[in-house]
Amino acid sequence: MLKIDCLVSAENHLGEGPIWDDQLQALFWVDGTGNRVGKPAIWKMDYASGKIDNWYLDKDIGAMAIRKNGQAVLALSDGFYFFNFDDGSLELIEKVDSDNTRIRLNDGKTDRRGRFIAGGMDDKEELDICSLWQLDSDLTVKRLEENIICCNGPCWSPDDSVFYCADTFKDTFSAYSYDIETGLISSKREFASSKNEQGLYDGATVDSEGCLWTAMVIGGDLIRYNPDGSIDRKIGMPVKNITSLCFGGPNLDEIFVTSMARVVHPAAHDHFAADARPQFSAGSLYRISGLGIKGIPEHRFAG
């Protein structure tokens, strides 16, 4: 039987980017704009004990991935960095679009060759001035796509042949042909549209059956799409501003869902205008169990 629990009352300003690490049996996630209100930016929950650790940063954070050495690689507002959990130190890899303060790196994920893919967003959520970037294991940075307002939900089909990525404020989830050997994308096409849905596309993942799951921020539903882009099911969450999700747990059969407590937005649009005050438990981490569906293990960054 499907069950939804509020797992951690984290009060995240902008909870995002959950990743399950099989080796550590731990869940990591980020608070994208937590630094703006004095909150921790990186969160970790040990599955067996429930112990919570967190770390502060002085920059916005879009996404993270665990490295093969157990440390982390981060997509921060102005570029890619290594992060050391032991002392909280950052090491710059390369800055991207740092000359434009409206642009910050947003959602990201690692492919099954260990490349870290992260896309940018216009902080005012208005102009398509951002790009999709690839950080390879040799630390070279490559631009894969341009003309993005807000990149969200990068993920891959189980056979690595399809790369999915949403542009949230264009109401579109795109699919690309993906070359796992080179990490290049091609043949962009529309996979799904949110124009007739409640909410907008945010974070996403793909399950072991090849179906894509996405969190509908503002709307509060998780949507599961079949590989052909048709909707298989929707799950309503306790809060409307859900932001991302991942499969995890010892059997990879639980879904962890992040959310945001932030109600003030710098955007030019009015999507969030109705959020005059925080929702009860907004900013918490949720867990869904009893689905009978499994995810795919996340790979560590190879660099």
Image (spheres, grey):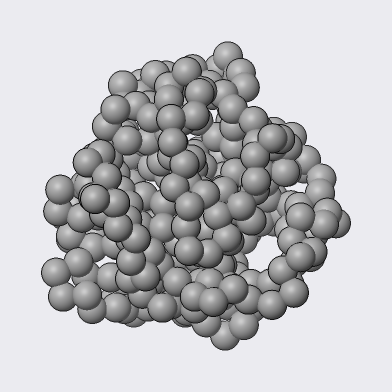
Q: Residue furthest right?
A: 268
Can you give x and y, in whole percent of width and height, for residue 59 in the image?
59, 71
Give above or below for 187 relative to 194.
above
For the image, the number of numbered tags is 0
Name the residue at 47% across, 18% down: 228
Question: Quick check: 93 left or right of 84?
Answer: right
Quick check: 282 above or below 152? below
Q: Residue at x 36, y 74 (%)?
A: 8
Quarter occupied by residue 241 = bottom right
Can see residue 297?
A: no
**Horizontal arrangement in the rendering, residue 57 relative to residue 251 (left or right):** right
Q: Is residue 28 above or below residue 128?
A: below
Asked which quadrant contains residue 210, the reply is: top left
Which residue is drawn at the image coordinates 32% and 35% (left, top)? 207
Across and down, in percent, residue 277 comes to 69, 77
Q: Is residue 97 left or right of residue 16?
A: right
